[in-house]
């Protein structure tokens, strides 16, 4: 879905007053891939212990989540991650509509 968003936002619908068929082809390729994966059968078995553990998990606040990510991103400091998060949320607030994004 992210790919579709980038295609939609990063490519104009028309070029010189004509339909942008390159954009339509990109969208077609992504949707075809999604449909292909939807046709596959995934035979997962229930594992009650894992289901119980997942159900008990509480969502982590963004600030805490980004701070924990620092442990796996040794090249970035927590302050860099928090600054990046703040800037990202400034430009694209959570739950913002298209018109609200800077």
Image (cartoon, grey):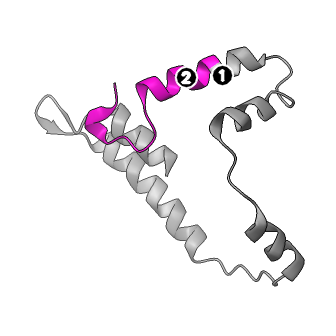
Left or right: 86, with 63 as reference point = left
**Contact flag, marks 1 and 2 (Cβ < 8 Å):** yes
Residue 51, quarter of picture: bottom right
Q: Residue at x 65, y 42 (%)?
A: 61
Percent position of residue 91, x then y: 42, 24
Binning the other alpha carbons within 10 Å of mark 2 as few (below 14), some (14 to 19) or many (20 upward) gives: some
Left or right: 83, with 57 as reference point = left
Is 86 in the magenta?
yes
Percent position of residue 66, x then y: 71, 32
Near-viewer residue (6 or 55): 55
Q: Which residues are magenta?
A: 83-102
On residue 86, the disc is 2
Looking at the image, residue 54 lies above or below residue 99: below
Percent position of residue 16, x then y: 14, 28
Is 85 in the magenta?
yes
At mark 1, the secondary structure is helix
Q: Residue at x 46, y 54 (%)?
A: 29
């Amino acid at each position: 879905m992210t790919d579709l968003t980038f295609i939609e936002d990063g490519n104009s619908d028309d070029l010189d007053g004509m339909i942008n068929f390159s954009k339509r082809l990109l969208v077609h390729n992504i949707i075809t891939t999604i449909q292909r994966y939807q046709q596959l059968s995934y035979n997962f078995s229930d594992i009650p212990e894992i289901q119980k553990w997942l159900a008990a998990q509480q969502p982590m606040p963004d600030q805490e989540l980004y701070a924990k990510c620092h442990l796996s991103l040794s090249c970035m400091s927590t302050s860099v991650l928090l600054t990046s998060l703040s800037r990202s949320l400034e430009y694209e607030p959570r739950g913002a509509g298209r018109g609200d994004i800077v």
